[in-house]
Image (cartoon, grey):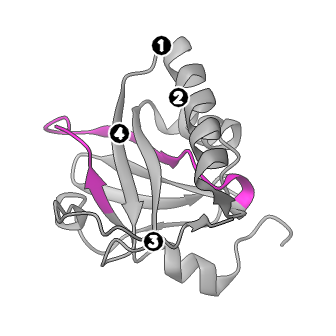
Amino acid sequence: MHNQIDNALWQQYQQVWFRPCGALPATPRGAIISLWNPNGVKQTQAKNRRFQHLLYRAIKRRGYRTHAIWGASAVLDYREFSVLILCSERTAARLAALCAQKAYYFVDGEKIWLCNTYYPQQRVQLGTSFRARLTYNALPSHNHAIVSR
């Protein structure tokens, strides 16, 4: 399938951890969408920040409540600035497409799914709860998610 995410990348997406930047709702329901690296292409810090600010303003203008959160590897050395957007499942894929992301996470209380933005048949419930995937460890100085130039 053209829009299906290849298995290696799909497996990598399933190993995600989340590092909240502040308090989260007690029972969140919404999409976690990266605001960095559009279309899976690594960008510089400056380009990622510009993209992040543009998208964040666009999401807020539409009236969505958001919570800043990092989507990251287990040791946080690869992390993308993301937002938990309180929204319905139906809206989640539209917002992920707006943010030019191949995939997003949908949280409903303690359950969390990895969802392909453009191919709804590619979807998997992750094996642990959302809270079990939260970490509050300090962020390392280096981030492999950005290109240094």
At label 3, which amino acid type do we have?
Answer: Tyr
Residue type at tag 1: Gly
For this rendering, which residue is in front, 138 or 148? 148
Disc 1 residue crowd, few under 14, some 14–19, many 20+, Cα 10 Å: few
> Could you tell me how far apart the alpha carbons at marks 2 and 3 are, in whole angstroms?
21 Å
Residue under the point 42% across and 71% down: 142
Q: Is residue 72 visible?
A: yes
Q: Is residue 20 magenta?
A: yes
Looking at the image, tell me whether mark 4 or mark 2 is earlier in sequence order. Answer: 2
x, y (%) of residue 55? 60, 31
Left or right: 132 as drawn, with respect to 19: left
Residue 30, percent from left and from top: 39, 38
Give me the C-alpha separation between circle 3 and circle 4.
16 Å
Under circle 4, the secondary element is strand
Q: Which residue is mark 4?
A: 68
Q: Quadrant of residue 9?
A: bottom right
Q: CA distance from mark 3 to mark 1?
A: 30 Å
In terms of sequence position, does the residue under pointer 3 or pointer 1 come before the other? 1
Label 3 residue SS? loop
Give the residues drawn in magenta, as a range: 18-39
Write down the residue under mark 1: 63
Q: Secondary structure at mark 1?
A: loop
Q: Would you say residue 56 sits in the magenta stretch? A: no
Residue to which mark 2 is pinned: 56
- The location of residue 94, given as percent across then percent down, is 65, 36
Q: Which mark is residue 47?
A: none
Mark nearer the viewer, 3 or 4:
3
Where the C terminus falls, by quadrant? bottom right
Kindly report the distance in space between the C-alpha atoms of the residues bearing marks 1 and 2: 11 Å
Dots 4, 1 in contact, CB < 8 A: no
Closer to the N terminus: mark 2 or mark 3?
2
